[in-house]
Amino acid sequence: MKAKLTRVKTIPLIGFLFALFFLPVNLFAVPSYARQTGLACSACHTVFPQLTAFGRAFKLNGYTLTGIKTISEELSSKDEKDIRQYLRVLGISPMSGMFQTGYTSLNKTMPDTQNNNLEFPQQLSLFYAGQVTPNIGTFIQLTLDNESGTIGLDNTDIRYANQTSGKIPITYGFTLNNNPTVQDLWNTTPAWGYPYTSSGVAPTPDASPMIENLGGSVAGLGAYAMVNNMFYFELSGYKTAQLGAALPPDSSVFGALSGTSPYWRAAIQKQFGKNYLSVGTFGLATKIYPDGIADNTDNYTDVAFDMQYERQFTNGQFTLHTAYTHENQKLNATYDAGNSEYLNNNLKKFDIDGSIYLKQGINFTAGYFNTSGSSDNGLFSAEAVSGNNSETPDNSGIKTQIDYLPWENTKLSLQYFAYNKFNGASNNYDGFGRNASDNNMLYLQLWFAF
């Protein structure tokens, strides 16, 4: 065997080229991907972090497409019939940063607090995002959080991707990640759904499906495949991986998973003319020890259906996202401890949002949300601001947003959230006289990546 050291300009993968058939010419936006590919941010995003078809293909292929010179080494056999690329390292470091700051004003000040709050920063993140080997790429986020004042591992997705060479192209791969749906290609799932960021100060409803609440506390390994650039399938398994918690988990660990929680994803996508449509389903079945490792667990099964539609027009794009999640809850541990009225409950959540993006750097979004479920006087109780006096998880309202991008990596956003119901009711929802509309929020944010 002999080794050969070269510096070459890499070319797109065969499967990635096939995906270009579906792309309109216009990830989470990190400039290291732009530096790696030699492409502007608009290749992968309309308004970050919303992905274009090109961005979805880049993520599917493991963040490995490169358009710059790399340091490469090839190993060849003695007869030089077999040549294997043994090394391909980027000539630049795949590091990026992100800064967010925000200003929040509530319709009514929370008791014993100050209104009109500034978070500076709201988040400050460092990313290792880019190609590691010819088939492995990363999205690793380390974040300083304003509210907790701590630095920790944020959204992380490490991928291996490859393609088959048959008549029907198949892109397949593996993902190692720490948040169910962070590996997803569409902006309809919890990790990447609208609103993509929001205030860290304003009150938020207390009921949401379990699939939305595991990020950063689990680790999962999954396999996926995109067949003929149309049919997507994924199966993953998640286990407890809480930072700073006892290992192995013991009675001091709250919210640990029991065993492995399966996650599944299937979707169909199609580009027809200037229109794009994807329809899919995803879900998670998990067993959780709510109060330390014990005999019983609370069991949750989430099943969701989602759709994404895009329509290209001369000066921009219209995008529609919608998702419906149904969660069955069997609260063995909570019920036995006397902390829930019923053993079996359910939770239903519906979200829809539509946006109009103009190439001048302006984006308008409006969304509606509705959460409902079982009444349970053990799970819900009266408490100022965060409480629930009606004993139901019902929430509903609208979320609107205007974005302005003076540059592709810089965004100014203005959000307004208006609640019809909050924690179960419109009036006196907490039992202390606070109404749902008191939590209506105006939020101004500056977000840029570098």
Image: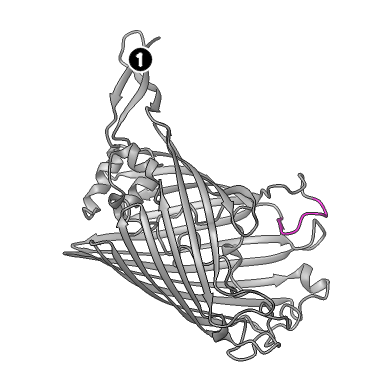
**Compared with residue 202, is residue 260 higher up or lower down, i.e. above or below?**
above
Kind of residue at badge 1 = Leu
Q: Quadrant of the N terminus?
A: top left
Per the image, label 1 sits on a secondary structure element best described as strand
**Image height of 86 relative to 258, above or below:** above
Percent coordinates x, y for residue 8 in the rendering: 29, 23
**How would you classify the magenta stretch by its main secondary structure?**
loop
The residue shown at (28%, 60%) is: 270
Answer with the quarter of the image where residue 132 lies.
top left
In the picture, measured across the screen, residue 77 lies left or right of residue 154, that is left
Residue 252 within the segment the image draws in magenta: yes
**Residue 195 placement: quadrant:** bottom left
272 relative to 113 in the view: left or right:
left
- Residue at left 56%, top 54%? 179
Q: Which residues are magenta?
A: 250-257
- Residue 178 horizontal side relative to residue 49, left or right: right
Task: Say if 222 sits above or below 433 in the image.
Answer: above
x and y, in percent, of residue 193 in the image? 45, 64
Q: Quadrant of the C terminus?
A: top left
Which residue is denoted by mark 1 in the rendering?
5
